Image: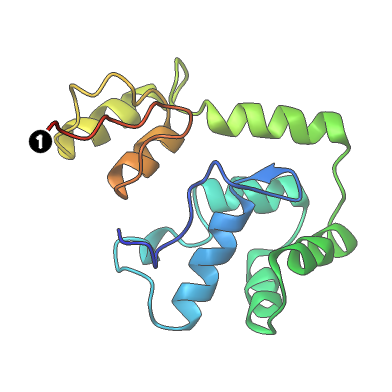
Amino acid sequence: MNNSGPRSPFVRTGGLVYFGRMIDKIRLHAQGKLGGEYVPNLGKGFDERCIRFLHVDYHQLVDRVKQGGSDEEILQWCFENGRRPEPDEIYVWNEFMRKRGWNDEVSETLKRRKKESHMAGRSEIQSMFDYIDADEGRTPFGQPKPEPPLP
């Protein structure tokens, strides 16, 4: 995906990984600019995990995003209409999410997706977040950027 797509799942909003990506997808979909490959999973998968963590309804969140506001204002709405996790809960959430696909029940899905995307040999892709970044043309977060070729 190009730079107009959803941001990396590693990017934090109010300390939370993934939340900003979910908001990006909602905004892009509302504008008719979200790639078709994303649409079937709106509100599912990691989106669903995020809204369950915050105790908010996805359709209500979509309505709130469509009203406008910054990511931080929308997150504040989630805290007021769902729950505000404690710092330790946010730490556990972030660590759990950023490691999905690494030695857990999602590992086979990651392996399959890498193979389907012709990335099976890319050892730096160890989690679903890494895969998302690589699939969308970003260097997986925390990985060194490749050196440019010599002239």
Q: Position of residue 72 (x, y in %)?
A: 76, 62
Q: Position of residue 118 (x, y in %)?
A: 14, 35
Q: How many marks?
A: 1
Picture quarter containing residue 108? top left
Q: Position of residue 67 (x, y in %)?
A: 69, 84
**Residue indicated by mark 1:** 151
Residue sitting at the far front: 151
Q: Tell me the quadrant of the picture where the C terminus can be found.
A: top left
SS at circle 1: loop
Looking at the rendered structure, the kind of residue marked 1 is: Pro
User: Counting other residues with Cα less than 10 Å from the Cα at mark 1, is it few (<14), some (14-19), or many (20 or more)?
Assistant: few
Q: Position of residue 50 (x, y in %)?
A: 64, 48
Residue sitting at the far left: 151
Q: Considering only vertical position in the picture, is 111 above or below 10? A: above
Q: Nearer the viewer, residue 151 or 80?
A: 151
Q: Nearer the viewer, residue 81 or 134?
A: 134
The reply, left or right, for residue 57 in relation to residue 38 is right
Q: Considering only vertical position in the picture, is 42 above or below 66? A: above
Q: Considering only vertical position in the picture, is 23 above or below 17? A: below
Q: Considering only vertical position in the picture, is 64 above or below 131? A: below
Q: Tell me the quadrant of the picture where the N terminus can be found.
A: bottom left
Describe the colour scheme in one phrase: rainbow
Query: Residue at left 48%, top 55%?
Result: 7
Picture quarter containing residue 80? bottom right
The reply, left or right, for residue 43 in relation to residue 106 is right
Query: Residue at left 86%, top 64%?
Result: 81
